[in-house]
């Protein structure tokens, strides 16, 4: 289904491709892309503003996560994403670099309170914040009312209240995410065994390969969650939008290893010749791509498949489209 906006950029109920095509042919709307999703914007006041409930089913995972946006009768869009799994290692490298500088008496800031004790760890926050970013992005295109999540649980100890309430970063991050979702939408949680029972009842097949880009790998569960919310079967839509997060290396003091002449090179940064890295641009030769690093007054461009296209591109040959921290692949 196609996302629809009014003249004030307020999201309306999505429409079918056939209806969107008629609106474009009559001149009542014009089309544009919003980070890989086709949208239309009305040039006149809509005939009605009747809203229906729209739910987002979320199937969390350690490597891949699935999202299904659906109404009570049909699926709007399926999304499959990676998880930002590099944060834990990056924090450890940063800590080791900081400790090494202090051991060799290099000037450094005064040590602050150990923020790693208690609270939400950076790796846990990154994983659950990624879900929240996707939800906020979808809410800019669809009038979402409800969110239903498969309630994952860590191993518990029998008869231990304190251990079971705050023993795991998984549990702490999950509760943090739930509280933020409740501020904007109606939250529903479903146990894993309930998802399996409904999936078996609907005779949906699930593949065992968790790294597969097929609908049957993860999106089948997010679709089942949407059906549990409606209480009725929804015709499955097996096309999905694949999102891969970009790892942007923030500015560091230097690289870890010495270069020629025993001099460490500068490393990291999020700007390339005035453009933010990860930004989507349209090049006169390579078409749609995103910005990578820069060197000697030129920038590098990467295709949406992640492969580098060139390292010597002039900024003037690129037309800026939008900021982004991910790349997309239609599956």
Image: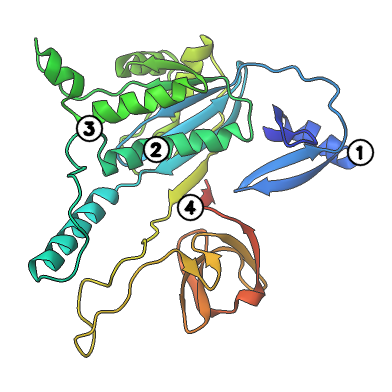
Residue at image location 62% in from the left, 22% down from the top: 74
Q: Nearer the viewer, residue 73 or 87?
A: 87
Residue at mark 3 = 169
Residue at image location 48% in from the left, 67% down from the top: 271
Residue at mark 1 = 26
- Check whether the beta carbons of the residues at disc 1 and disc 4 lie within 8 A of each other: no
| Residue 217, quarter of picture | top left
Q: Give how far apart the Cα atoms at labels 1 and 4 are.
A: 36 Å
Q: Nearer the viewer, residue 202 or 173?
A: 173
Q: Residue 154's spot in the image, x, y percent?
A: 20, 25
Q: Residue 143's spot in the image, x, y percent?
A: 63, 25
- Check whether the beta carbons of the residues at disc 2 and disc 4 lie within 8 A of each other: no
Q: Residues within 10 Å of mark 4 (few under 14, many from 20)?
A: some
Q: Give how far apart the Cα atoms at labels 1 and 3 are.
A: 54 Å
Q: Give how far apart the Cα atoms at labels 2 and 3 are.
A: 14 Å
Q: Give how far apart the Cα atoms at labels 2 and 4 are.
A: 13 Å
Residue at image location 60% in from the left, 75% down from the top: 315
């Amino acid at each position: 289904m196609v996302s629809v906006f009014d003249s004030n950029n307020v999201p309306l109920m999505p429409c079918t491709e056939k209806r969107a095509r008629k609106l474009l042919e009559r001149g009542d709307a014009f089309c544009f892309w919003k980070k890989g999703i086709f949208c239309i914007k009305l040039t006149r006041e809509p005939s009605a503003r009747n809203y229906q409930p729209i739910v987002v089913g979320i199937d969390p995972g350690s490597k891949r996560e699935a999202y299904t946006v659906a109404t009570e009768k049909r699926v709007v869009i399926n999304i499959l994403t990676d998880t930002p799994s590099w944060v834990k290692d990056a924090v450890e490298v940063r800590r080791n670099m900081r400790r090494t500088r202090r051991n060799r008496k290099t000037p450094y800031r005064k040590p602050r309170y150990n923020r790693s004790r208690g609270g939400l760890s950076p790796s846990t926050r990154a994983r659950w914040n990624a879900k929240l970013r996707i939800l906020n992005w979808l809410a800019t295109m669809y009038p979402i009312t409800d969110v239903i999540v498969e309630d994952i649980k860590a191993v518990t100890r029998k008869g231990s209240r304190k251990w079971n309430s705050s023993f795991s970063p998984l549990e702490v991050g999950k509760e943090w995410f739930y509280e933020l979702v409740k501020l904007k939408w109606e939250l529903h949680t479903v146990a894993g065994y309930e998802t399996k029972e409904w999936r078996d009842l609907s005779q949906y097949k699930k593949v065992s390969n968790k790294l597969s880009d097929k609908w049957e790998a993860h999106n089948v569960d997010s679709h089942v969650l949407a059906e549990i919310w409606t209480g009725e079967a929804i015709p499955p839509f097996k096309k999905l939008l694949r999102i891969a997060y970009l790892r942007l290396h923030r500015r560091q003091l230097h690289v870890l290893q010495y270069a020629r002449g025993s001099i460490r090179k500068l490393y990291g940064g999020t700007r390339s010749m005035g453009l933010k890295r990860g930004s989507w641009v349209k090049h006169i030769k390579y078409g749609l791509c995103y910005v990578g690093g820069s060197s000697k007054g030129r920038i590098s461009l990467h295709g949406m498949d992640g492969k580098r296209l060139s390292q010597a591109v002039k900024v003037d040959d690129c037309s800026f489209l939008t900021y982004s921290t991910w790349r997309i692949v239609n599956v």
